[in-house]
Image: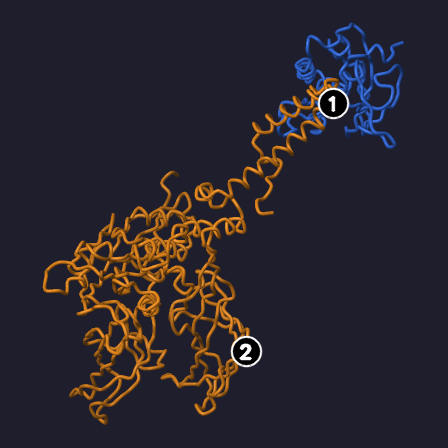
Chain colours: A blue, B orange
């Protein structure tokens, strides 16, 4: 079991997904910079890496006026109503994955710890409901460890 | 806020990028344990800080530029009006506010009963709205006319009755000018209403100065207001509120060939000490109606007479020419009695101080000009009248206003120069007629011809004392009102120069009207101005079938 000492000297980022993320088993996390009653938390390690992955994947490319290349076309496809089946979602994901991995790696340094560097990102499962899509993703870091998490996305598919 | 914040989506991306890089670097330097490469710190905190910081810095730069005269002159619309006024107030330049146009309206009614026009009554003319500022009561008996708002109902030749009221535009602006005889229609018709029209040209309408206008006066603002050099003299004139809207002026003095008044000595050389100041007080020449008492000077065998009317120096100072002579208050009469002769002279009598003027040529178009006009009245039989009988007539003249007032001002003891006299003259007029064709395809909407005429007039009337009117400039003015498939061609410019001694010379061209250089007659680019009114612009609209079918 890792402890705080294992992460000494690491750089931190604001925690955006509060809960056991990426954890083992299914846990619903809260997307918030500062949950009520708290002043916010910081994160590091694989939690920071997984958080970056989700934030870049779900950011609509071009939505940040002065960072036009940030984000992917993944949620743009969703907003255009292209998702009808799991195959549609899978196609959008893999079309966006190249851009996603490129952006994650462009922000990495060789001096970064291995568990903060992305090796690959894959889909493990897709569940399509009338008003939401759940993505199961597996993040493989340069350290060789895998982390699987589910990202529910509220979007109409019918 | 004096200088508006730019919208967040209207910033230079390079500036935002630089600000973002600087923010990340500074925060990272101060907080080495933070990851600012990607994630919430970067995309939420650093990014939006950079955007807002850039907006503020741009605002500061805009403010600093707005305080700079150099930047304001390059971009007069950079800062809002309050800021520009604040900067230019340091140079004694203040914004001229707009004025409302005003004039007289003759109302014709069919019954000889008292008519009341209430305060705030609205009249419409030329796309503008005009209102009365008092109650007007038209009465039949002259003895009943005793209040400021009372008007006398006078009979017209066609059996109706007419009275005249004053109206003023609802809004400020130079676009509310109405020409004499133009229809001025009341929104609420008075009892017995027949028609109503402008009794004379409306005047006084002025638009508020723009930032560019104020900057144009900057040099005048810092100049000494004195009868000194040309800049100082113009600054002096514009310092007076009444004369601050002078359109253009040209000062002829020692050494100029157009100056004749400084050669009155026995030596055939210029002695200096004389200034002729040609002042264009407004863009268009005004038509002014003056009611004068005429004298019967000759009786013809046909029972008709020749009458004579005198225009004194105070009737229409600096007037250009007599346009018409008609019976007094006969508004329904169209045209003019034949003008047989017009003899002009100079009247310097009874003045404490008068410029040195020794002839008509030297004093033409000045406030000292007088005229004796003889005309033939072909409607009034004079069999029963004896020579010397009197009758009232309306004399309409073309004139620029304020010539007399400006002369009185520069001649006043406190203002006039110690070593020179200054004669104010209306510029020698070149009355311009413009004709051209507009060619459009079938189905294309006809351009707004009134707007085209107004644009052409504005272009002609804005030419300074340069002596040339270019057709290309007029084409530019026309083109601004034409759509892509509509074109103007066949431009013909015709100018009539009325020389100081009354003769007419003509110039004509379809490229450039050139004022002749005739300083011996005081006609040159330094003394002549182009004048054009909308009725002098002729437009023929041609519809062509498209050929690209």
Would you call the spot at circle 2 few (<14 residues within 10 Å), some (14-19), or many (20 or more)? some
Of B79 and B512, the residue lying toward us? B79
Q: CA distance from mark 1 to mark 2?
A: 72 Å
Q: Residue under label 2, please give it.
A: B118
Is there a contact, CB below 8 Å, between mark 1 and mark 2?
Answer: no
| Image point (26%, 86%), residue name | B380
**B331 horizontally vs A90: left or right:** left
Q: Residue under label 1, please give it.
A: A55
Where is residue B450? Give x, y as percent.
Answer: 40, 58
Where is residue B232? Give x, y as percent.
Answer: 34, 55
**B130 horizontally vs A44: left or right:** left
**B487 horizontally vs B295: left or right:** right
Q: Quadrant of the C terminus of chain A?
A: top right
Q: Is residue B20 visible?
A: yes
Image: A39 above or below B5 = above
| Image point (67%, 28%), residue name | B47
């Amino acid at each position: 079991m890792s402890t705080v000492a294992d992460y000494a000297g690491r750089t931190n980022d604001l925690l955006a997904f509060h809960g056991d993320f990426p954890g083992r088993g299914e846990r619903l996390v809260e997307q918030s910079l500062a949950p009520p009653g708290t002043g916010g938390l910081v994160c590091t390690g694989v939690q920071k890496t997984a958080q970056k992955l989700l934030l870049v994947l779900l950011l609509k490319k071009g939505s940040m006026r002065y960072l036009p290349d940030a984000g992917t076309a993944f949620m743009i496809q969703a907003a255009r109503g292209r998702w009808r089946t799991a195959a549609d979602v899978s196609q959008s994901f893999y079309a966006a994955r190249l851009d996603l991995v490129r952006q994650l790696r462009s922000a990495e340094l060789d001096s970064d710890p291995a568990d903060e560097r992305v090796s690959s990102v894959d889909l493990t499962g897709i569940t399509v409901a009338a008003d939401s899509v759940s993505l199961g993703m597996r993040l493989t870091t340069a350290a060789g460890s895998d982390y699987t998490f589910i990202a529910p996305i509220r979007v109409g598919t019918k | 806020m004096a200088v508006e914040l730019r919208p967040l989506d209207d910033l230079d991306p390079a500036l935002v990028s630089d600000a973002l890089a600087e923010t990340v670097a500074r925060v990272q330097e101060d907080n080495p344990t933070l990851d600012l490469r990607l994630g919430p710190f970067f995309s939420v905190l650093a990014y939006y800080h950079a955007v807002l910081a850039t907006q503020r810095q741009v605002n500061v730069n805009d403010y600093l530029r707005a305080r700079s005269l150099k930047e304001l002159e390059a971009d007069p619309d950079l800062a809002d009006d309050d800021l520009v006024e604040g900067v230019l107030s340091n140079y004694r330049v203040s914004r001229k506010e707009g004025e409302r146009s005003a004039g007289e309206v003759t109302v014709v009614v069919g019954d000889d009963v008292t008519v009341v026009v209430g305060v705030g009554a609205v009249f419409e003319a030329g796309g503008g709205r005009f209102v009365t500022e008092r109650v007007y009561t038209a009465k039949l008996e002259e003895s009943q006319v005793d209040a400021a708002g009372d008007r006398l109902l006078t009979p017209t030749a066609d059996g109706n009755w007419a009275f005249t009221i004053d109206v003023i535009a609802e809004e400020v602006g130079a676009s509310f000018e109405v020409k004499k005889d133009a229809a001025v229609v009341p929104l609420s018709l008075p009892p017995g209403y027949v028609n109503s029209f402008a009794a004379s040209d409306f005047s006084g309408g002025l638009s508020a100065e723009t930032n560019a206008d104020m900057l144009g006066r900057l040099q005048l603002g810092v100049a000494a207001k004195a009868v000194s050099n040309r800049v100082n003299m113009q600054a002096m004139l514009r310092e007076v509120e009444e004369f601050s809207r002078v359109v253009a002026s040209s000062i002829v003095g020692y050494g100029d060939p157009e100056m004749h008044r400084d050669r009155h000595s026995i030596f055939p050389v210029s002695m200096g000490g004389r200034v002729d100041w040609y002042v264009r007080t407004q863009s268009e020449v005004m038509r002014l109606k003056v009611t004068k008492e005429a004298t019967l000077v000759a009786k013809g065998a046909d029972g008709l007479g020749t009458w004579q009317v005198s225009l004194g120096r105070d009737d229409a100072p600096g007037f250009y020419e007599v346009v018409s002579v008609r019976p007094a208050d006969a508004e329904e009469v169209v045209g003019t009695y034949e003008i047989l002769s017009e003899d002009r002279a100079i009247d310097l009598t009874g003045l404490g101080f008068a410029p040195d003027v020794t002839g008509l040529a030297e004093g033409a178009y000045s406030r000292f000009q007088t005229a004796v006009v003889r005309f033939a009245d072909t409607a009034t039989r004079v069999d029963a009248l004896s020579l010397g009988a009197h009758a009232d007539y309306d004399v309409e003249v073309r004139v620029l206003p304020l010539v007399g007032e400006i002369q009185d001002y520069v001649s006043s003891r406190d203002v006039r120069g110690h070593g020179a006299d200054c004669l104010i003259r209306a510029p020698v007029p070149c009355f311009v007629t413009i004709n051209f064709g507009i060619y459009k395809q079938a189905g294309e909407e006809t351009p707004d011809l009134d707007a085209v005429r107004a644009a052409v007039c504005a272009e002609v009337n804005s030419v300074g004392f340069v002596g040339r009117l270019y057709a290309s400039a007029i084409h530019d003015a026309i083109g601004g009102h034409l759509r892509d498939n509509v074109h103007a061609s066949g431009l013909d410019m015709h100018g009539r120069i009325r020389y100081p001694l009354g003769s007419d010379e003509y110039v004509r061209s379809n490229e450039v009207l050139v004022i002749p250089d005739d300083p011996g007659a005081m006609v040159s680019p330094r003394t002549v101005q182009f004048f054009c009114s909308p009725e002098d612009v002729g437009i023929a609209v041609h519809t062509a079938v498209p050929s690209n079918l």
